[in-house]
Amino acid sequence: MSRRARNPSQPLTLGLFERTGRQDCGNAFDANDFNEVIRKDRKAGKIRTARQIVDDTWKEWEAGGEFEQQWLEQQSGDFESLDPHACFEAWAQGWRACAVRQVQDLLYEMEEREREEREDNPMHRKNPHAHELESEITEGIARALWVTAYADWVRNLPAAQKRELGAGPGEDWTDVAPENPRTAYDAAAQLERLFAQANAGAAMVDLLADAMEADGKKSAGFAYAHRFGHYMAMQALDHGVSWFDDHAQFAVNFPGFEAMTGDGESVDWSPMSIANPRSSSRRKTGR
């Protein structure tokens, strides 16, 4: 865990510690720390999302109570007027957010290998069931809502705060935004209900099945489901990016939705009318 590098004239903030956590993870992330965990999960038939894997692994690392203490000692008491524990929590939040992204990539790579094995061997074990994919769709929706709301909030801050909290050159807002707050999942649940209302009662996992059929896929993994949730949310927000940029068209109606934050810590939302939802093509009234 490296010490942060900063301009001596720059005041210490929790945001700086959070960003340092992301940078430390990016510089020192070891896939071997998680590859074995994922393999054991697969062998035991256990299904966890990237966030669950990172959170559970982090709890194991902290179990002895020495992890935070070691980090604090490395900082040599350089916290100015900030609470040291709060600084550690901010650093840890940034590290975990980066690790979740890395583990998602590992899961995707493993799913691709399993898909190739299934193609070679039809008797190979099937992909996760619908209810397991459902949580990953929600994760993708919640992340999209939170990141777009957070980015809009940062862009309206004074210049100094924008430099501290915003995405720098070559950085992705998904990597920069803090972990999803609980309200992001509340907003995601509301958007999922609106999708159902706009699509003859179809749940998000039903729409995922339609997308898979259009793409000619017989099975889907976590990464596919996460991207699906992300782009469904982005299209509902009308942010100009689309699932259909890289995937086959299927019939789906998009409710209008707005997500915003006034404090950079929680999500507020405003569902728009679904009386005339945007449609990718004409959708059947029954399933």
Image: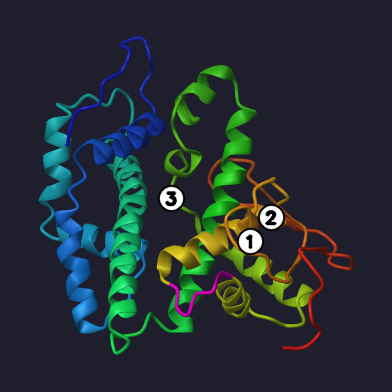
The part of the chain drawn in magenta is 215-220
- The residue where tag 1 is placed is 232
Say the numbered circle drawn on residue 278. none
Q: Are marks 1 and 2 in contact (CB under 8 Å)?
A: yes
Relative to 151, say whether 180 is above or below: below
Residue at position x 69%, y 45% from top?
240
Q: Is residue 47 magenta?
A: no
User: For the residue carrying disc 2, how many other residues have a C-alpha within 10 Å: few (<14), some (14-19), or many (20+)?
Assistant: some
Q: Amino acid at mark 1?
A: Met
**Of labels 3 and 2, the one closer to you:** 2
Residue 188: tell me if it is visible.
Answer: yes
Say the numbered circle drawn on residue 235. 2
Spot occupied by residue 198 in the image (x, y as percentages of width and height):
78, 73
Examine the image and state in which quarter residue 59 appears. Answer: bottom left
Spot occupied by residue 271 in the image (x, y as percentages of width and height):
76, 60
- The residue where tag 3 is placed is 179
How far is the residue under mark 3 from the one under mark 1? 20 Å
User: For the residue carrying disc 1, how many other residues have a C-alpha within 10 Å: few (<14), some (14-19), or many (20+)?
Assistant: many
Left or right position of 187 against 120: right
What is the secondary structure assignment of the residue under circle 2? Answer: helix
Spot occupied by residue 179 in the image (x, y as percentages of width and height):
43, 50
